[in-house]
Amino acid sequence: MDQVLATKVIDTARFYMSGDNCQPFRYRFNLATQTFHIDYLAAQAKHTFVYDDYTILLTLGSLLEYLKVSLQEINYSCELSFDFECFSAYQDKSSICSAIVTEQTKQTKQTKDTSLFSALKQRFTDRRPYRGPETIDIAIASLDQQLTYSTCKLFTNAAKNTLHFFAGCDSAIWFSKTLGKDIMDAVAFDPKSPTGLPWRNLGVKKSDAWLIKAIQRYHWLFNVLKHCGARMLMLRTQKKLWLSSKSFLVFTYHPNLSREHKTIACQQMMHTLLSLSKNGYVFQPSTMSAEILNSPLKSTNIISSAHMQPNKLEQEVRTQRAYLDIAEGEVQWVLRIGKVVTPLDNEALTNRHTTDTLITFE
């Protein structure tokens, strides 16, 4: 593989899912050893969510699946190795993962599936209302069998109080000024911005979006709007979204996994999501729901890290974990799932850094 092919691979793989579109990873390709080295940049990932490695492993797993699919498209495969020794989400980590690439045989080329690559190129997070649960037809058992280190469950026509719980989790940013500012500062109003979430993809009215822009400029407005009932307004909007399809996916880790195994689990989860994307499904991840559901399992959790005030969400966690039937398992991710009537407008699609800023050669 030469520089041209390596650049072509990264030009597609760079669209991996990334929390708040922070893109905390960079690539180095060694021409002699035919190896992609993936470096972690802590400053890029700076966020209240990054109190442990939870979101970093989600992001890294997504990146690796996109890298694998992009390589397969040009008839290459890769062998992964990880280095999590002394890893901290707050410190840079050189070569946190390495991928040695190998050209595939003719037999492998003949059997390759290009549909995932097409899905990858078109995949995006859609935060609009979805069509009803009757539009969902998924053989979840076959998908779950492809997962080595986690379990996947699909809920359709889900209990109303659970959907309200997830809406409450998504609205819980108003319980923490630190977390709220972090998330609102990540909203991008420049349609060409390579970082941040495009405001047109937030599922909010233009007037609400301008309130976010005002908070970005004057952080003291957060408390003003909070006391004026901003959380209740957001809660109402989120309830409508969750009640539109009444359906969601829950991925749960198997117990006692290493960071390496969790990363592979996240890679396999992204493979599952790409498989569903090619069948017309769209998703809205609810990382807050996963974090709050996991709060009893972690001595340091999102509630304590974001200095949230005690609220009824904490009291409901046990009830919802019982409904989801996940025992004491750690939730990997919660995603609202459904189908939409019309494609998302191009102005709402999330941008990425240009390829030449993401890859260097050795």
Image (spheres, rainbow, N blue to C red):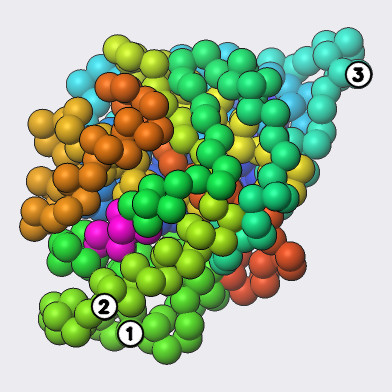
Mark 3 or mark 2, which has the lower sequence index?
Answer: 3
Q: Is the C-beta separation of discs 2 and 1 under 8 Å?
A: yes
Q: Mark 1 points at which residue?
A: 211
Is 127 on the left-hand or right-hand side of 113? left
The residue at 54%/52% (across/down) is: 246
Secondary structure at numbered mark 1: helix
Callout 1, which amino acid? Leu
The disc placed on residue 110 is: 3
Secondary structure at numbered mark 2: helix
The residue at 25%/62% (across/down) is: 173
Name above or below for residue 215 compared with residue 173. Answer: below
- Disc 1 to disc 3, C-alpha distance: 53 Å
| Mark 1 Cα shell of 10 Å, populated few (<14), some (14-19), many (≥20) | some
Query: Disc 1 vs disc 3: which is toward the camera?
Result: 1
Q: Does the magenta stretch include residue 144?
A: no
In which quadrant of the rendered view does residue 298 lie? top left
Which region is colored magenta?
A: 167-173
Main SS of the magenta segment? Answer: helix
